[in-house]
Image: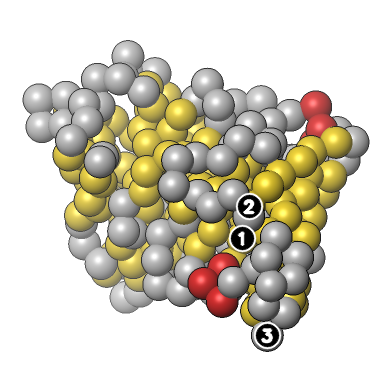
Amino acid sequence: SYELTQPPSVSVSPGQTASITCSGDKLGDKYACWYQQKPGQSPVVVMYEDSRRPSGIPERFSGSNSGNTATLTISGTQAMDEAAYYCQAWDSSTAVFGTGTKVTVL
Amino acid sequence: QVQLQESGPGLVKPSETLSLTCTVSDDSISSYYWSWIRQPPGKGLELIGYIHYSGSTNYNPSLKSRVAISMDTSKNQFSLKLSSVTAADTAVYYCAKLIRSSGYFDYWGQGTLVTVSS
């Protein structure tokens, strides 16, 4: 089965840039999307079709996808961005989620 | 703004069938795709399956033999049945609207914790 691997954790200082990677076989040939999940809350999509931001998502969130790696970048990270982030792509007719990354804003 | 609300028993006995319903407000399920996703405590997300308004379904191969998703357009609801549950099925279960053309889950319910225990 298809797997998407993310680093378990990323730490970033306020105002700095956080990069979260998502690795999967030929992931660049698929669309990747990203969800933010804060404790006790439902996931919220922050990026879709690799680099498109849904309405209401701040411009500091950006995305890219090439080769075997998709990346979600948070520029000028704020305390409110502290959360778990999950990537997601499609393997045939099944959506596959990444292992998740906890972003800590120190 | 689309709203989704899961409902159903919070406790299910091993070997029994888990049944949940998702009620959709401010949108019609007679369009788009509608899905079930679960998250075991402290773990990641797993797609269970989804249903198109035409009634066609697609299930995660790992759960396919135990899952059934159906819809009731008259009530604007869709439902999940997961049979022969074990403790490994203990999770928060989310319903979500799927934008299949772009491949992402747009709106999510608040989730409901289902515990499998005797």
Q: Residue at x 66, y 25 (%)?
A: A92
- Pick the front one: B64 or B3: B3
- Residue occupying the far bottom of the picture: A106
Q: Name the residue under label 2.
A: A61
Q: Quadrant of the C terminus of chain B?
A: bottom left
Mark 2 touches mark 3? (CB < 8 Å): no
**Chain to which mark 1 belongs:** A
Nearer to us of marks 2 and 1 is 2
Q: Which residue is drawn at 25% across and 52% down?
A: B6
Q: Which residue is drawn at 59% across and 71% down?
A: A78
- Residue occupying the far left of the picture: B74
Task: Answer with left or right where residue B118 lies relative to residue B104.
Answer: left
Residue at mark 2 shares a chain with residue at mark 1: yes
Task: Answer with left or right where residue B106 lies relative to residue B78.
Answer: right
- Residue occupying the far right of the picture: A67
**Mark found first going from the N terminus, 1 or 3:** 1
Q: Examine the rendering and report whether any part of residue A78 can be seen.
A: yes
- Pick the front one: A17 or B26: A17
| Separation (CA) of disc 2 from disc 1 | 12 Å
Mark 1 touches mark 3? (CB < 8 Å): no
Q: Give x and y (percent) for residue B5.
A: 22, 51
Q: Which residue is drawn at 63% across and 32% down?
A: A49
Q: In this view, does B29 lie above or below B85?
A: above
Q: Give x and y (percent) for residue B106.
A: 43, 39
Residue at mark 2 shares a chain with residue at mark 3: yes
Residue A85: which disc?
A: 1
Q: What element carries label 2?
A: strand
- Residue occupying the far top of the picture: B54
Q: Name the residue under label 3.
A: A106
- Pick the front one: A39 or B80: A39
